[in-house]
Amino acid sequence: MSPQVGVIMGSDSDWPVLEAAGQALDEFGVPYEVGVYSAHRTPQRMLDYAKTAADRGLKVIIAGAGGAAHLPGMVASATVLPVIGVPVPLKYLDGLDSLLSIVQMPAGVPVATVSVGGARNAGLLAVRMLAAHDPALRERMARFQADLEKLVLDKDEALRA
Ligand code: RP5
């Protein structure tokens, strides 16, 4: 099956954070592709990627970047696909700069922003988006959520014992 999700980042230095998105997609058997597309260092490559993504069969793009994190917003401006933004925390400012750069989009160009470093949730959100049109994936997501609930209930029970 061709990649359904594009997991892209502004620098290879973002990968230690972004790989959690890939792990989540792996857990659900969702094929994805990975790449580095810098909004500032390789702007044309980034635009080419965004403009061709839908025609190449991608359904969702997860874009992570840190600092002046313009990648998710710029990609969203050049594709019709849903874009999930992951603020990557860097050495300074605890990722607040990344978060604010991604979350405060102008009206008309949405980016679904997850928490600072929240790449796993970005992967899970992409699965939910795909599951909206895929009953089997929806069933897997329901099982995943039931397992999460059981984990909490088991811990509660252990605490009380
Ligand atoms: C951003 O600049 C990247 O997304 C990365 O988080 C940050 C630093 O990049 P490097 O200097 O580590 O390549 O565009």
Image: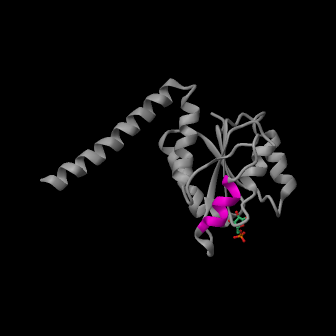
On screen, residue 118 above or below 145 = below
The quadrant of the rendering that contains the N terminus is: top right
Which x, y percent locates residue 77? 80, 44
On screen, residue 81 above or below 91 = above
* Relative horizontal placement of residue 68, taking residue 31 as reference (left or right): right
* Relative horizontal placement of residue 27, taking residue 47 as reference (left or right): left
Picture mark count? 0
Which x, y percent locates residue 93? 62, 72
Report the residue that reaches farthest toward the bottom: 92
Q: Can the viewer see residue 71?
A: yes
Is 100 covered by the magenta stretch? yes
> 3 or 100, which lies in front?
100
Q: At x 24% / y 52%, what residue is drawn?
A: 155
On screen, residue 133 above or below 17 = above
* Corner quadrant of residue 12: bottom right
Ligand 1 found in image quarter: bottom right
Report the residue that reaches farthest toward the right: 44
Q: Which residues are magenta?
A: 95-103
Which x, y percent locates residue 104? 69, 53
Q: At x 58% / y 25%, what residue is drawn?
A: 133
Q: At x 72% / y 50%, what residue is drawn?
A: 105
Which x, y percent locates residue 18? 59, 57
On screen, residue 25 above or below 139 = below
